Image: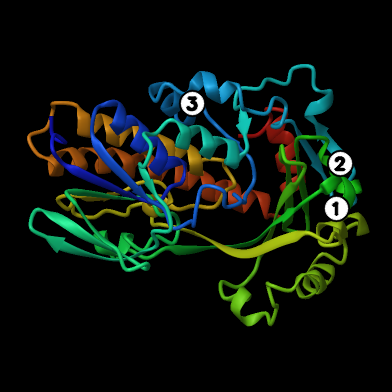
């Protein structure tokens, strides 16, 4: 087997990296996952994740984790309401008798716990913030901010959209999509955002008006995550003068930018516990390519970042994980480089198509006709 007596380092302990570690451990490989979080108890931010049958769920099936997934997923969390700026409801899955839960939802925290619990003790090395990489014989020496260094024969970058390892693989830069998201989380939503908590009804709300969007998702811990989407300048966050560590500063911007929206949306910032971050949305070129390197590759957002408006991010990462594991553990290749080349070629083709679809969605959801188009799509009248 290609990986016999090889040390494998996965940089990044997100869903893609942890799933790959699980799949490779099932095949007897020696794995370490290096994660920058201080420990496993760091709070996981972000919206719920919907897993797709051919990608996310397939990865968990191959990892032997489908049963525990269904013990932890959130039934009906995918039920969606589509509303306008005044919270008028135009589509409601809660009253749709034909609603089918074909993309089950799970919170990020429980999914990470499932994956962590499936790994051998000591697999994840916490407080390991990657700083640099250097060639060392047939492998690599990895350096971390805490002063530690480790050797690996194979390094996999699973360190997300702002990957520090990607530049070692390719110089291809990301392209701004034209949309910036303000991502946030409202804790204790029943107390701090009662109007919005009632509107979301344990599921999701997508609101559209005047080329802007607000997407709300309920979470099992009683919080709401939200994304505001606006067509604004790429450097808006740096040039806006907003102090993103100051809730009132962000709230002042929101009240001006969304001044023609119902005042109920102000609950996004009215509670005592609010977390926010500006996220300009980028993607890589549809025709990106690079020469495969021996012993170094990427998966997930490090390889193919894209906006979240198709729900494909985590699913792509999990599909990367099982396709990479399959290439590395089958006896079809003479060298690790050959296996990586096969994986990368099929991954890049798949990512190109999904990125194109995602960009189409991103444009549609921030058009003047977003509400009408989204309602039509939910009725099966628009594709």
Q: Which residue is mark 2?
A: 199
Image location (x, y in percent) of residue 80:
75, 34
The image quarter containing residue 232 is bottom right
How much space separates mark 1 and mark 2, taking CA atoms? 13 Å
The residue depicted at 65 percent of the width and 34 percent of the height is 382
Numbered disc 2: secondary structure: helix
Q: Is residue 224 above or below residue 343?
A: below
Image location (x, y in percent) of residue 100:
68, 20
The residue depicted at 88 percent of the width and 40 percent of the height is 198
In the rendered structure, which disc, 1 or 3, sits on the residue that comes first in sequence?
3
Q: Nearer the viewer, residue 337 or 151?
A: 151
The residue depicted at 32 percent of the width and 60 percent of the height is 166
Q: Nearer the viewer, residue 19 or 351?
A: 19
Q: Is residue 318 visible?
A: yes
Q: Is residue 369 visible?
A: no
Quadrant of the frame with the C terminus: top right
Q: Is residue 315 above or below residue 11?
A: above
Q: Are marks 1 and 3 in contact (CB under 8 Å)?
A: no
Image location (x, y in percent) of residue 52:
52, 29
Q: Which residue is mark 3?
A: 57
Q: Which residue is mark 1?
A: 85
Q: Is residue 96 above or below residue 125?
A: above
Image location (x, y in percent) of residue 335:
9, 39
State which mark lies toward you, 1 or 3. Answer: 3
Task: Please state if 253 lies on the left or on the right of 300 as rendered.
Answer: right
Numbered disc 3: secondary structure: helix
Task: Please state if 381 lies on the left or on the right of 130 as rendered.
Answer: right
Residue closest to the far front? 121
């Amino acid at each position: 087997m290609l990986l016999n007596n090889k040390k494998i380092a996965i940089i990044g302990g997100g869903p893609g990296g942890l799933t790959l570690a699980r799949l490779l451990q099932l095949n007897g490989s020696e794995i370490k996952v290096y994660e920058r979080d201080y420990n496993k108890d760091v709070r996981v931010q972000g919206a719920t994740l919907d897993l797709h049958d051919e990608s996310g769920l397939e990865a968990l099936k191959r990892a032997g984790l489908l049963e525990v997934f269904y013990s932890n997923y959130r039934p009906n969390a995918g039920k969606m309401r589509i509303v306008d700026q005044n919270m008028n409801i135009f589509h409601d899955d809660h009253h749709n008798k034909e609603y089918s839960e074909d993309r089950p939802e799970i919170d990020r925290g429980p999914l990470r716990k499932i994956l962590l619990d499936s790994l051998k003790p000591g697999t994840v090395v916490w407080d390991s913030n990657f700083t640099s990489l250097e060639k060392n014989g047939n492998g690599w020496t990895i350096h971390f901010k805490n002063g530690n260094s480790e050797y690996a024969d194979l390094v996999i970058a699973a360190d997300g959209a702002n990957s520090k390892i990607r530049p070692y693989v390719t110089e291809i830069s990301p392209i701004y999509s034209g949309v910036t998201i303000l991502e946030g989380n409202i804790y204790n939503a029943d107390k701090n955002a009662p109007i919005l908590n009632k509107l979301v009804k344990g599921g999701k709300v997508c609101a559209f008006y005047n080329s802007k969007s607000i997407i709300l998702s309920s979470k099992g811990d009683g919080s709401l995550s939200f994304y505001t989407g606006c067509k604004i300048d790429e450097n808006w966050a740096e040039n806006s003068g907003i102090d993103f560590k100051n809730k009132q500063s962000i709230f002042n911007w929101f009240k001006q930018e969304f001044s023609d929206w119902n005042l109920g949306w102000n609950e996004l910032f009215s509670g005592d516990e609010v977390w926010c971050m500006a996220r300009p949305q980028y993607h890589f070129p549809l025709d990106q390519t690079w020469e495969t390197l021996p012993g170094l590759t990427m998966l997930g957002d490090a390889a193919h970042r894209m906006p979240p408006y198709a729900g494909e991010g985590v699913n792509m990462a999990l599909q990367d994980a099982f396709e990479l594991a399959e290439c590395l553990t089958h006896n079809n290749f003479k060298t690790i480089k050959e296996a990586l080349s096969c994986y990368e070629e099929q991954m890049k083709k798949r990512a190109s198509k999904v990125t194109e679809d995602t960009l189409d969605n991103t444009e549609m959801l921030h058009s003047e006709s977003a509400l009408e188009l989204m309602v039509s799509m939910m009725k099966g009248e628009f594709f």
